Amino acid sequence: SRRHNYENPLEIINARSEIEKNVHFHRIQSAILQDELPSKSDLEVFYGNYTDFIFNIIDIYKRLNLKRKCELNASTHLSRVGAVVYQLNMNDEGTYKYSAIAMMHDAVEDLLDYPKLSRNNKIHINYYNSFLDDFIPKDLQQSVKILTNHYNFIINYIIERLKGEDKSV
């Protein structure tokens, strides 16, 4: 496992340490690292009724072969963040809202098709809204949008415009 950043609050460090002992978390991470899809029964432990959306997101990350700078599948990061939020008991009793939101926090900026978003040199809000409806449950959309890094969103839009105009990036 990755070394902990000990400048994080102790509560987060402890939650990360505890989640690493969880067999369901291990099976999820192991599947992702082996370029396989985790079982829905393992995902349900952390994401409950949002499991199908989470599974779909992990599947798309896998199909697109999205990697972090360290070359690990990018969904390993999402999975860890969601599991840590679960371990911190941030969900309301009987719900999985906050662990699901945490797991989806990078999905919009990572999975959005920027050429579709920026066709004809305009941002197509209908495409953006349709994307959200397809990948993020309605009741989580506002929270996920708040966590979306819109700086990267805008930079990617500009890069696509420059590519479309055959300009150097």
Image (cartoon, rainbow, N blue to C red):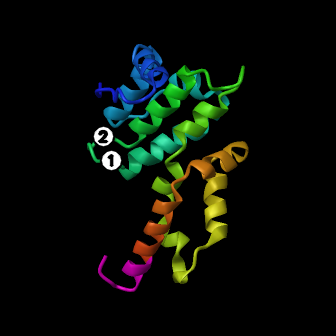
Q: Amino acid at mark 1?
A: Lys
> Residue shown at 41%/29% (left/top)?
8
Q: Judge the density around disc 2: few (<14), some (14-19), many (≥20) Cα neighbours within 10 Å.
A: some
Query: Marks 1 and 2: CB-CB under 8 Å?
Result: yes
Q: Amino acid at mark 2?
A: Leu
> Residue shown at 39%/28% (left/top)?
29
Of pointers 1 and 2, the one earlier in the residue sequence: 1
* 166 drawn magenta: yes
Question: Looking at the image, can residue 70 be seen?
Answer: yes
| Residue nearer the viewer, 47 or 106 | 106
| Residue nearer the viewer, 114 or 14 | 14
x and y, in percent, of residue 113 in the image: 49, 64
Task: Provide the residue designation for mark 2.
Answer: 72
> Residue shown at 39%/86% (left/top)?
165
In terms of secondary structure, where does tag 1 sit? loop
In terms of secondary structure, where does tag 2 sit? loop
- The span shown in magenta is 161-169
x and y, in percent, of residue 125 in the image: 65, 69
Mark sitting on residue 67: 1
Q: Judge the density around disc 1: few (<14), some (14-19), many (≥20) Cα neighbours within 10 Å.
A: some
| Residue nearer the viewer, 53 or 68 | 68
Where is 86 relative to 67, above or below?
above
The answer for how far apart the CA atoms under marks 1 and 2 are is: 5 Å
> Residue shown at 72%/20% (left/top)?
93
x and y, in percent, of residue 76 in the image: 39, 36
Question: Looking at the image, can residue 51 be seen?
Answer: no
Quadrant in which the C terminus is drawn: bottom left
* 156 drawn magenta: no
